[in-house]
Image (cartoon, helix red, strand yellow):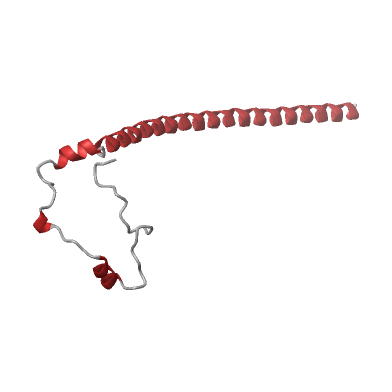
């Protein structure tokens, strides 16, 4: 009889222990799923905000490109900028350039400081 009581207690203890472990595991799984759903919701909100900011950046890029068009720039400065008169133009000879820059620095047609034959608005 004592052995049967001992076996019943052990079976009861084993059953309760398993139920406790599985119960805690189930509660842990539910808690993890809740945390995952919170993180997913937060990610959705961040993605929505990122999309809004991306649209705003795209709009600003469009505004920038429109404002930097030559026709827009010309309209913005019309009446304020004009070609200089002959009196305001200064011509520099190659000898003057050599004297000012020194002999180590040579300005020629194949250097970056040479003229390229392009003027504002001719492209």
Front position in the image: 30 or 120: 120
Quarter of the image where the C terminus is located: top left
Residue 110 falls in image quadrant: bottom left
Front position in the image: 6 or 80: 80
Q: Is residue 34 left or right of residue 81?
A: right
What residue is rendered at 24% in x and 69% in y? 96
What residue is rendered at 31% in x and 33% in y? 62
What residue is rendered at 18% in x and 61% in y? 91
- Residue 118 position (above or below residue 56): below
Q: Position of residue 107 (x, y in %)?
A: 33, 63
Q: Is residue 21 left or right of residue 42?
A: right
Q: Position of residue 11 (x, y in %)?
A: 81, 27
Q: Is residue 102 left or right of residue 51?
A: left
Q: Where is residue 108 in the image (x, y as percent from the top left)?
A: 34, 61
Front position in the image: 53 or 105: 105
- Residue 63 position (above or below residue 80): above
Q: Is residue 73 left or right of residue 101?
A: left
What residue is rendered at 24% in x and 37% in y? 67
Q: Where is residue 98 in the image (x, y as percent from the top left)?
A: 29, 70
Front position in the image: 44 or 61: 61
Q: Disc count in the image? A: 0
Residue 88 falls in image quadrant: bottom left
- Residue 91 position (above or below residue 45): below
Quarter of the image where the N terminus is located: top right
């Amino acid at each position: 009889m004592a052995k049967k009581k001992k076996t019943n207690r052990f079976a009861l203890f084993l059953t309760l222990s398993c139920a406790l472990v599985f119960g805690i595991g189930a509660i842990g799984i539910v808690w993890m799923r809740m945390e995952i759903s919170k993180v997913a919701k937060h990610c959705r909100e961040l993605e929505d905000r990122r999309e809004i900011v991306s649209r705003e950046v795209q709009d600003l890029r469009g505004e920038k490109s429109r404002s930097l068009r030559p026709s827009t720039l010309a309209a913005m400065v019309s009446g304020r900028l004009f070609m200089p008169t002959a009196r305001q133009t200064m011509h520099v000879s190659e000898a003057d350039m050599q004297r000012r820059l020194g002999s180590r620095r040579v300005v020629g047609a194949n250097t970056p400081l040479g003229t390229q034959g392009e003027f504002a608005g001719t492209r």
